[in-house]
Structure formats: structure tokens, C-alpha cells
Amino acid sequence: MRVALEATGGIETAVGAELVATGLPVIVLNPAQVRSFAKAIGKRAKTDPVDAGVIAAFAASMRPQLLPMPDAQARLLADLVARRRQIVAMIVTEEKRARMAASREMKRSIQRLLVALRRELASIDTDMDGHIRKSPLWLVRQDLLTPCPASGRPWPGH
């Protein structure tokens, strides 16, 4: 089994990281290729169930090479994912406290903490994104997106 994700402008890195951290094999696909595949098989509707079916069919038909993430990278990514979950949980808790806070001083304290937590969340997201983009998981997608110098189109066979 493998999980195929279409690159969606950044969301795929967080989702991919979560899945890789659980040990699932993940491939990030070029959305232009998936759209071309969808046209070729006559699937033009843009609904989530149709998109999911097209992505699954593309992965099954094209069989993009799966490159496992090295163990050290996978452990680091799992640590980052775990820490991200903790920070998100803290943000949710502090937002609830802010809604229930009775005094301005309490609300200001909570808001200062929320600013720091959101800054840390952004930092972890950047770290995760960097690790994913350096991984074999992302390099498959990068290869798919790199145009052939002679034609300007994707490499033959991709």
C-alpha cells in the first residue's frame, strides 16, 4: 500500500509529514500530470470524491517510484509532527481560555502566549516543510515537475 497526495500549495507537506511519521509510504504527485490524466480518462468534475478516485487511478496506472525516507529523517519528522500536535493542542486550549477570561489582564496574558505559540507553530511548519522538501518523498515530485531542457515539457516517461 502507498498513499498518493496531489501537491496542493503547501498542505501536502504537513499531511505527508503526518503520514510518513506513522510509517506509511507517501508519494507527492504533480497536479498538472493528475489533471492531464483526468482529462485522458474523461473525469473532469472537480469534486473531492472524483479527485480522490483520479489520484488513486493515476498512482495505480503510472506507478511513480516510491523512495522511502531514511530512518533518521523519518524519526526527526515524527518528532516534529508530535511537537506540532502538542503546540496546536496548546493553542486550542489557550483560545478556549481567552473566550472565558473575565479580566483584561488575563486576556492580554493569554493573547501574548497565543502570539508566541503561533510563532512557534509557524517555525515548526517551516522546519517540517524543509525536511519534507529535502526528502526522497519530495524529490520524486521535484523530478516530475522539472521540465526537459529540450522541450520545456516534463521528461519522457513522467
Image (cartoon, grey):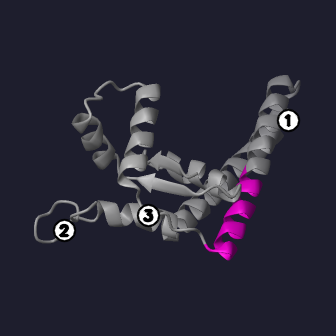
Residue type at mark 3 is Gln
User: Callout 1: helix, strand or loop?
Assistant: helix
Q: In terms of depth relative to the viewer, which is nearer, 5 or 93? A: 5
Alpha carbon separation for disc pair 1 and 2? 60 Å
Is 111 left, or right, of 12 in this rendering?
right
Say if 52 sits above or below 84 in the image: above
Query: Does residue 33 appear anywhere in the picture?
Result: yes
User: Callout 3: helix, strand or loop?
Assistant: loop
> Which residue is at a point 60% across and 64% down the rendered structure image?
127
Circle 3 residues within 10 Å: few <14, some 14–19, many ≥20: few
- Region rendered in magenta: 70-84
Q: What residue is shown with label 1?
A: 105
Q: Is residue 156 found inside the magenta-colored segment of the image?
A: no
The quadrant of the picture occupied by the C terminus is bottom left
Q: In terms of depth relative to the viewer, which is nearer, 31 or 114? A: 31
Q: What residue is shown with label 3?
A: 65
Principal secondary structure, stretch drawn in magenta: helix
Badge nearest the viewer, 3 or 2: 3
Residue type at mark 1 is Glu
